[in-house]
Image: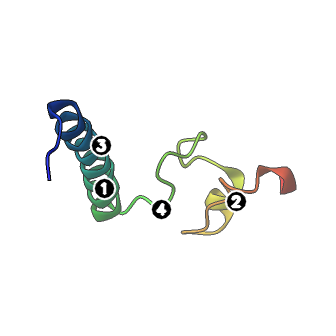
Amino acid sequence: MQFALVDIIGILIILAIVGGASYYIYREKKKGRACIGCPMAGDCQRKKAQAGACSCSDNSKE
């Protein structure tokens, strides 16, 4: 099998992106954050009312 250098570089870039995203999620979960990437920065009304509940995915019910 013969790979072009462009293919190898592309695969390495994709692996770096996926690895970086996985590490970011792991690090945030270890800190105890429930809403990773929440546009409200974890300051939504439902989270204030119920400890641990996150309404980031269904903002239409607020």
Q: What type is the residue that disc 1 sits on? A: Ser
Looking at the image, tell me whether mark 2 or mark 1 is earlier in sequence order.
Answer: 1
Left/right of residue 41 with respect to residue 59 in the rendered view:
left
Question: Which residue in the protein does label 1 denote?
Answer: 22
Disc assigned to residue 46: 2
Labels 4, 1: front one: 1
Figure quadrant of residue 12: top left
Separation of marks 3 and 1 at Cα, in angstroms? 12 Å
Residue 53 rendering spot, x and y as whole percentages: 61, 67
Q: Secondary structure at mark 2?
A: helix
Left/right of residue 38 with respect to residue 15 in the rendered view:
right
Left/right of residue 35 with respect to residue 11 in the rendered view:
right
Separation of marks 3 and 2 at Cα, in angstroms? 36 Å
Of 50 and 32, nearer the camera is 32
Question: Which residue in the protein does label 4 denote?
Answer: 34
Separation of marks 4 and 2 at Cα, in angstroms? 13 Å
Residue 51 rendering spot, x and y as whole percentages: 56, 69
Q: Is residue 44 above or below residue 9?
A: below
Question: Which residue is at 25% across, 54% downward?
Answer: 23
Q: Secondary structure at mark 1?
A: helix
Dots 4 and 2: beta carbons under 8 Å?
no
Labels 3, 4: front one: 3
Dots 2 and 1: beta carbons under 8 Å?
no
Question: Which residue is at 65% across, 49% downward?
Answer: 44
